[in-house]
Image (tube, rainbow, N blue to C red):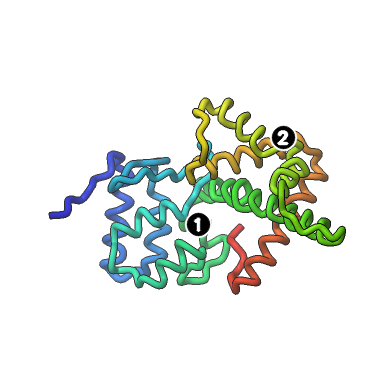
């Protein structure tokens, strides 16, 4: 017999109840999901043997992780392919404007979502764009090796090697040193890198790097046939 886990937070329980009731009454699951996300309060929780972390560094909202958690509550009510498209490709079943998306999840969560978008997705794209630049530079010189290309990208973007930055991050957060990063820790490290870069770089450099990262994201998404992220 499968037992249902009850959220410790009353607001979270109301969010789940709203989701289930809305879908049962015929509302589209995606709209009901976004409304439930607006009602949700917990920044992290343990559910079915897994630790879910929805808010990074207290300010960056990883909304698709919460979406995955909530969709588990309504199971077969959501077509499997639509669920996969949303959770793995951020491709929703309905086209909503930025304002509609903001209104449904609420302004506070939308601001935190933008923190995640720029602090994690865009930051990852910036490093990837610089790696791409370095490879082109090496190719022009007849060099084919990718050895140390990631460290060189980190030095170009942040002024330090990746390992040195990771040590700084763990020391600041008081995390123990390990051979590998968990997915949650990697997201938090990426967000920390974003804040580290913005704090130390000139505004013109920050704007230039952000533009470079956004162009990289647009190229990659176009190549995959995906639409731009909400922002």
Q: Which mark is residue 103?
A: 1
Closer to the camera in the image, 108 or 82: 82
Looking at this view, is 148 or 170 the one in front?
148
Mark 1: few, some, or many residues within 10 Å (few <14, many ≥20)? some
Q: Which residue is depicted at the point 56% across and 60% down?
A: 99
Q: CA distance from mark 1 to mark 2?
A: 31 Å
Image location (x, y in percent) of residue 210: 73, 51
Disc 2 element: helix
Please name the residue shown 33% across and 42% down the image.
46
Mark nearer the viewer, 1 or 2: 2
Name the mark on residue 199.
Answer: 2
The answer to whether the residues at label 1 and label 2 have Cβ atoms under 8 Å apart is no
Q: Is residue 77 above or below residue 194?
A: below
- Helix, strand, or loop for circle 1? helix
Q: Up-down: is 196 above or below 149?
A: above
For the residue carrying disc 2, how many other residues have a C-alpha within 10 Å: few (<14), some (14-19), or many (20+)?
few
In the drawing, does residue 200 fall left or right of residue 104?
right
Residue drawn 36% across the image and 53% down it: 69
Residue at 36% x, 66% y is 29
Locate the N terminus by quadrant.
bottom left
1 or 2: tag closer to the N-terminus: 1
Q: Position of residue 50 (x, y in %)?
A: 34, 46
The location of residue 227, given as percent across then percent down, is 60, 69
* Left-right relation of 152 to 173: right
Picture quadrant of residue 9:
top left
In what quadrant of the picture does the C terminus appear?
A: bottom right
Considering every residue shown, the one lying at the far right of the view is 141
Outermost residue, left side: 1
């Amino acid at each position: 017999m499968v037992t249902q886990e009850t959220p410790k937070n009353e607001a979270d329980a109301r969010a789940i109840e709203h989701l289930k009731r809305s879908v049962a009454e015929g509302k589209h699951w995606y709209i009901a999901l976004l409304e439930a996300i607006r009602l949700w309060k917990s920044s992290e929780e343990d559910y079915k043997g897994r630790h879910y972390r929805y808010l990074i560094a207290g300010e960056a909202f990883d909304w698709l992780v919460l979406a995955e958690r909530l969709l588990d509550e309504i199971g077969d009510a959501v077509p499997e392919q639509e669920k996969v498209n949303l959770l793995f490709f951020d491709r929703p079943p309905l086209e909503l404007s930025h304002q509609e998306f903001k209104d449904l999840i609420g302004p506070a969560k939308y601001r935190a979502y933008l923190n995640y978008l720029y602090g994690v997705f865009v930051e990852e794209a910036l490093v990837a764009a610089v790696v791409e630049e370095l490879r082109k530079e090496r190719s022009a010189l007849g060099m084919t090796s990718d050895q140390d290309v990631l460290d060189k990208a980190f030095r170009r973007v942040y002024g330090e090697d990746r390992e040195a930055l990771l040590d700084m991050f763990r020391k600041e957060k008081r995390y123990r040193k390990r051979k590998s990063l968990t997915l949650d820790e990697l997201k938090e490290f990426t967000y920390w890198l974003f804040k580290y870069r913005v704090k130390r770089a000139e505004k013109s450099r920050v704007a230039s790097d952000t533009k470079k990262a956004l162009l990289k994201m647009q190229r990659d998404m176009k190549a995959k046939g995906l639409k731009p992220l909400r922002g």
